[in-house]
Amino acid sequence: MLVESYKIASHNDSLLKGHENKLAFTRSEIAGTEEIIQKLVDFQIAIPSWALGTGGTRFGRFAGGGEPRTLEEKIEDVGLLHTLNKASGAISLHIPWDIPTDPKAIRALAAQHGLKFDAVNSNTFQDQADQEHTYKFGSLQNVNKAIRKQAIDHNIEVIKHGIELGSDSLTVWLSDGSCFPGQLNFRKAYQNTLESLQEIYAALPDDWKIFVEYKAFEPNFYSMTVGDWGQSLSYARKLGDKAYTLVDLGHHLPNANIEQIVSLLLMEEKLGGFHFNDSKYGDDDLTAGSVKPYQLFLIFNELVEGMDARGMNHAKDLGWMIDASHNVKDPLEDLLQSVEAIMIAYAQALSVDRKALEDAQENNDVVRAQEILQNAFRTDVRAIVAEARLRAGAALNPVALYRELKVRENLIAERGLKTVSTGL
């Protein structure tokens, strides 16, 4: 479904006066708003192709209708999101869920929607119908060399698809691990995984990166072979300069200090990017910022400070992507909400008075340091985020316009009520 520019303009006109009043007040509260707005305009968050359909749990799935049935329809849906917010200008594919049969045509379609291809993602956590060996007991760690070779070949094949699409990075998440004590030898599992990753690393083009993702538990519940950021960092250091750690916000044990992890990985020049989501318990499938918005802000606070300290480009030097499963919401509305929450946290972090915070830290003024951060977090920056969208040609209120245009109803009429998106 296409959203014509005149519909966005009409929507914005109806909200413009109220928006300008809010923006004027926000300008009086926050210094340097023009610079913040420009950074927001430049900032893009990739949408994963697998997040465009209704998700599910081990207990059930309740499809919402109108889901994209093909890669082409997934690109159209991400293009729709990008039209509404102008902050979702990339799509990340999961292979083999979304193998492009005609890469040139797929690239052309993406370009029509103003999209590029972000990191490509391999899948050795599921058995596919045509594969010879099972990953029941692991893939890159497996004691069976033939199974490891199968998983290595798959990752190399994913790289080839990425090259055809113009991607420049590979994300590897492994479900490898064990469910019971004694099931595997930890040291041998690490060594097998490292050797497998080294073969994959050797197949990377010179200008590519590999992101090693970690997860504390699930689907294995006793050990994970890449279970935390330290293990991921260990692999990345051994692999080489093109290898980095990828931080998924929901892949930690409860109460982990993710902002400190981010800061240290940046300092070590091994932070590759993010999978944004939120969690209450041990899951990672909730809308970004829906449960722990202050933590999201604190993470961005460390990102802004650390990236500026290294002279990094906020928009280009790290990978930014959402990774969540939308079980009870309209997936497109959920993605719009996630992007909005990420932009708000980023804007809040940009508004922090860095000099004042540094002075407070150097003088051990704990109260002042807390006040500086909490004042930034409690300041309403939504008008700044909306202004960035307005200047980019997007909607002042993307979710409201989405509902006003009855997008989901139109998608159901076009695709049907019982469609199921691939990969879920």
Image (cartoon, rainbow, N blue to C red):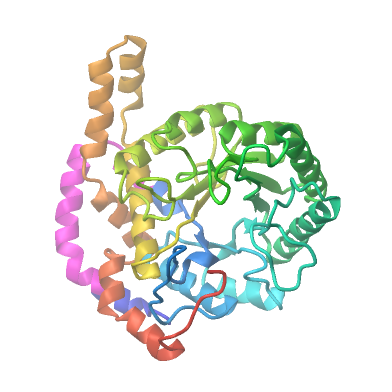
**Foreground pick, 39 / 149:** 149
Q: Is residue 17 magenta?
A: yes
- Based on the displayed image, in which of its 4 quarters is residue 269 positioned? top right
- Residue 20 in percent (x, y) is at 18, 56
Q: Is residue 180 left or right of residue 190?
A: left
Using the rendered image of the protein, determine whether residue 32 is visible from the camera's viewpoint. yes
**Foreground pick, 420 / 80:** 420
Q: Is residue 154 left or right of residue 333?
A: right
**Foreground pick, 105 / 326:** 326
- Based on the displayed image, in which of its 4 quarters is residue 238 positioned? top right
Image point 25% across, 73% down: which residue? 11
- Residue 39 in percent (x, y) is at 42, 46
Using the rendered image of the protein, determine whether residue 310 is visible from the camera's viewpoint. no
**Foreground pick, 308 / 188:** 188
User: On screen, 396 above or below 381?
Assistant: below
Which quadrant would the N terminus be assigned to in this image?
bottom left
Image point 35% across, 26% down: which residue? 354
User: On screen, 203 above or below 99?
Assistant: above
User: On screen, 419 above or below 308?
Assistant: below
Q: Is residue 235 magenta?
A: no
Q: Residue furthest top?
A: 363
Label total for image? 0
Span highlighted in magenta in the image: 11-38
Image point 60% across, 64% down: which residue? 93
State the predominant SS element of the stretch in magenta: helix
- Residue 296 in percent (x, y) is at 37, 41
- Residue 65 in percent (x, y) is at 40, 81
